[in-house]
Amino acid sequence: MKQTGTLTIMSLLSILFLTVHLADDIVRGYEKGGVSTLNAVAICTVWLCGTLLLSERRMGYIVVLLFSILGTGIPYLHMRGKGLGAAIAGTSGGFFFAWTLIALGVTTAFSVILSVRGLWILRNEKKG
C-alpha cells in the first residue's frame, strides 16, 4: 500500500476515534455537549478535507500533521494527574473509553510520522 493510502486510513481512523471519544465524554458528563461541540465538528471537517481533498499535497500533509499533533494531546489530557483509573474503573463502558484514548493516541502519533515523511518526500521531489 502506498504511504498516502496508509496516511488516509490512519487519519480517517483518528477522526473516527476522536468523534467516538467526544461522544463518550459528553455521555459521561466530561463535556457539556452544547453549541461548543460544533467547534469539534468544524475541526473534524477541516481535518477530513485535509485528508481526502488535499491528499498528496503540501497543504494536506500540513493539515493532517497539525491536527494529528493536537490529537496526540487528548490521551495526555485525560491521563495526566491521577489518570483514568479511579474515575473510569468499574463504570459501564470504561474499557471502551480507555481503548478509544489509546487507539486515538496510536493513530494520531502514526499520522504525525507519516505526514512528516510525506512532507519530506515532497521536498526531495522538488529538489530533484
Image: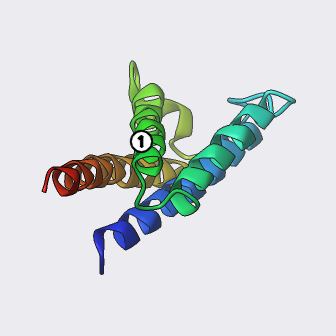
Q: Could you tell me which residue is drawn at 50 percent across and 42 percent down?
A: 89
Q: Is residue 3 left or right of residue 37?
A: left
Q: Quadrant of the N terminus?
A: bottom left
User: Which sits in the foreground, 101 or 117?
Assistant: 117
Q: Position of residue 71 (x, y in %)?
A: 46, 39
Three-letter amino acid code of the residue under disc 1: Ile
The mark tally for this picture is 1
- Up/down of 116 relative to 95, above or below: above
Q: Residues within 10 Å of mark 1 (few under 14, many from 20)?
A: some
Q: Is residue 96 visible?
A: no
| Residue at the extreme bottom | 1
Single out the residue that lies furthest toward the left: 128
* Left or right: 109 as drawn, with respect to 89: left
- Above or below, 25 relative to 12: above
Q: Nearer the viewer, residue 118 or 114?
A: 118
Residue drawn at the location 46% of the way across and 26% of the way down: 77
| Residue at figure coordinates x 46%, y 45% from the top left | 59
- Residue on which disc 1 sits: 62
Q: Quadrant of the C terminus?
A: bottom left
Above/below status of 1 relative to 127? below
Measured as percent of width and height from the top left, residue 69 is found at 39, 36
- Residue 75 visible in the snapshot: yes
Taking 98 as reference, is 23 left or right? right
Return the residue found at the far right. 35
Q: Which element carries disc 1, helix, strand or loop?
A: helix
